[in-house]
Amino acid sequence: MTNRLHLVFGGELIDPQGHEFRDPENIETIGIYPSYAKAYDAWKAAAHSTVDNAHMRYFIAHLHRLRDEKTETSLTQEMG
């Protein structure tokens, strides 16, 4: 079975309608998870912990898409 890794991260946005971080050097990494369901649970917990700050946003990145060895633009190909 293929690993389907997901990264949960977030931080304060400049504009709550956008996706640009106010301070990219201080983005919070929640963790890397082996399934979308576990990543979603971590995302939800992080999002709920900052519900009072409209500028805080958390995201789920699909890391497994970056390491597809059959795709020429994958991280594995670029690093190898």
Image (spheres, rainbow, N blue to C red):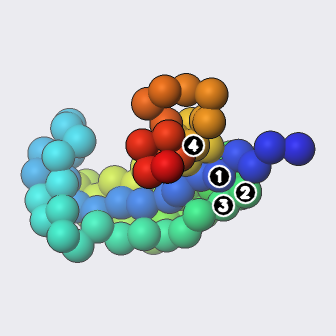
Camera-side mark, 1 or 4: 4
* Residue type highlighted by circle 2: Pro
Q: Could you say which is closer to the camera, residue 15 or residue 26?
A: 26
In the rendered structure, the answer to whether residue 40 lies left or right of residue 22 reads: right
* Residue type highlighted by circle 3: Tyr
Q: Earlier in the sequence, mark 1 or mark 4?
A: 1
Residue highlighted by disc 2: 34
Q: Which quadrant, please, contains the N terminus?
A: top right
User: Looking at the image, how many numbered discs can be counted on the residues?
Assistant: 4
Residue highlighted by disc 1: 5
Q: Secondary structure at mark 2?
A: loop
- Where is residue 80 drawn, in percent x and y? 49, 49
Distance (Cα) linking label 1 and label 4: 10 Å
Residue highlighted by disc 3: 33
Q: Which residue shows up at 49% across the image and 27% down it?
A: 72
| Mark 3 crowdedness (10 Å alpha carbons): few <14, some 14-19, many ≥20 | many
Q: Is residue 37 visible?
A: no
Distance (Cα) linking label 2 and label 1: 5 Å
Q: Are marks 2 and 1 in contact (CB under 8 Å)?
A: yes
Q: Secondary structure at mark 4?
A: loop
Q: Are marks 2 and 3 in contact (CB under 8 Å)?
A: yes
Q: Residue 27: which quarter of the image?
A: bottom left
Distance (Cα) linking label 4 and label 3: 15 Å
Q: Is residue 58 visible?
A: yes
- Where is residue 65 drawn, in percent x and y? 57, 36
Residue highlighted by disc 4: 67
